[in-house]
Image (tube, rainbow, N blue to C red):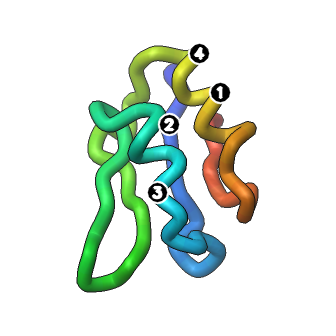
Amino acid sequence: MSKQVAIDQEECLGCEACVELCPEIFGFDIDEAKAYVIMEEGGDEDCIDEAIGSCPAGCISNE
């Protein structure tokens, strides 16, 4: 079973830290002012872990 990256949209502050760290995995919706997941199946685990650790809202999961 593979992991899936997700962002809790209600908790996202729109800081774009995840987008800056992993632009191939996360995108930013300017209209909603929220980050979203481009590649749900994940990618570079180290990058995802860094994004999770850098998220001030703690709204990114990789399960």
Q: Position of residue 36 (x, y in %)?
A: 38, 59
Give whichever of discs 3 and 2 has the lower sequence position: 2
CB atoms of marks 1 and 4 within 8 Å: yes
The amino acid beneath tag 4 is Asp
CB atoms of marks 1 and 2 within 8 Å: no
Give whichever of discs 3 and 1 has the lower sequence position: 3
Q: Tell me the element at label 1.
A: helix
Q: Which tag is nearer the camera, tag 3 or tag 1?
A: 3
Give whichever of discs 4 and 2 has the lower sequence position: 2
Q: Which residue is mark 1?
A: 49
Judge whether 41 appears above or below 44 on screen: below
Judge whether 57 appears above or below 26 on screen: below
Q: Which residue is mark 2?
A: 4
Density class for disc 2 (Cα within 10 Å; few <14, some 14-19, many ≥20) is some
Q: Which residue is mark 4?
A: 46
CB atoms of marks 4 and 2 within 8 Å: no
Q: Which quarter of the image is occupied by the N terminus? A: top right
CA separation in Å, label 1 and label 4: 5 Å
Density class for disc 4 (Cα within 10 Å; few <14, some 14-19, many ≥20) is few
User: Closer to the camera, 49 or 4?
Assistant: 49
Residue 1 showing in the rendered view: no
CA separation in Å, label 3 and label 1: 15 Å
Q: Tell me the element at label 4.
A: helix
The amino acid beneath tag 3 is Glu
Judge whether 37 appears above or below 24 on screen: below
Q: Which residue is mark 3?
A: 16
